Amino acid sequence: MKIGIVVFPGSNCDYDCLTSFSRLAKENGLSAEVGYVWHKESNPGTFDAYVLPGGFSYGDYLRCGAIARFSPIMEEVTAHAKKGRPVIGICNGFQILCESGLLPGALYMNRDLNFICEHVFLRTERSDTIFTSLCKSKEVLNIPIAHGEGNYYADDETLKKLEDEELVAFRYCTGDGLVTPEVNPNGSRNNIAGIFNKERTILGMMPHPERAAEPGLGSSDGQKIIVSLLKNIAK
């Protein structure tokens, strides 16, 4: 399988994603070619999945992800996604997916207008997707966030659709899995930390699974998301 890690000017989690996906594929006996794809590439070849990593694409000028959506590679990512092939956007990658219309809603400044970097608990809302098949339903994961604009917003109609169609992937919660306003770090509506597209082939999430991919990082819970994707692609 081939995994493309898209690199924009200002990406800073590309290497983290590359090493995590490569190492976890090897440790799970999966043959994977994981490589970088520069944002200016318009014909990069065929990939089984794209990863849009975290960082500050184009310095977050104008609005997070608003310039990156016009990079040539996004035409390829969009065409790839429309064929039902997997895409995961992490942090800034989530913002880019929303700006490019591949996912609904937008990411605003955090409620308290501060950059937040800390471990949070996430409740897995669905365990029957290619990104969460190694998780249990409502399983709580310990995964870090690092963002200044992670406040997920969608209008009432869009939010209702996300809820009715069960397209919320993760919610901020307590260690016991309770979803409360007190544990919402950024003001996201309905404590949303990540969402799927209708077909559940695209995942956007603000927390960083690649930063929770081995015990030495304080948590290895992110492995469940990365390995779920790798194993499902390999089928």
Image (cartoon, helix red, strand yellow):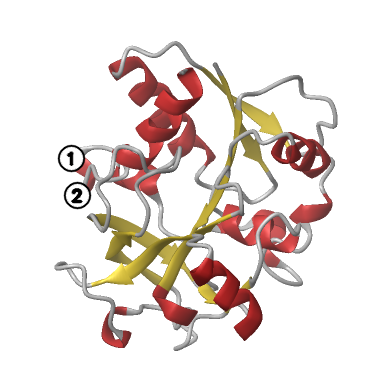
Q: For numbered disc 2, what is the local secondary structure?
A: loop
Q: For numbered disc 1, what is the local secondary structure?
A: helix
Residue at point 23% right, 55% down? 139
User: Is any part of residue 99 visible from this angle?
Assistant: yes
The numbered disc on residue 215 is 1
Residue at point 29% right, 62% down? 123
Among all residues in the image, which is located at the extreme front? 164
| Closer to us: 95 or 193 | 193
Residue at point 45% right, 75% down? 115
> Image height check: is 27 above or below 134?
above
Q: Is residue 1 left or right of residue 20?
A: right
Specify the amino acid type for callout 1: Pro
Q: Residue 16 falls in which quadrant of the image?
A: top left
Residue 224: x percent and y percent? 30, 39
Q: Are marks 1 and 2 in contact (CB under 8 Å)?
A: yes
Specify the amino acid type for callout 2: Gly
Residue 105: x percent and y percent? 64, 71
The numbered disc on residue 218 is 2
> Image height check: is 186 above or below 25?
below
Residue 147: x percent and y percent? 47, 67
Crowding at dot 1, Cα within 10 Å, few <14 / some 14-19 / many 20+, comes out as: few
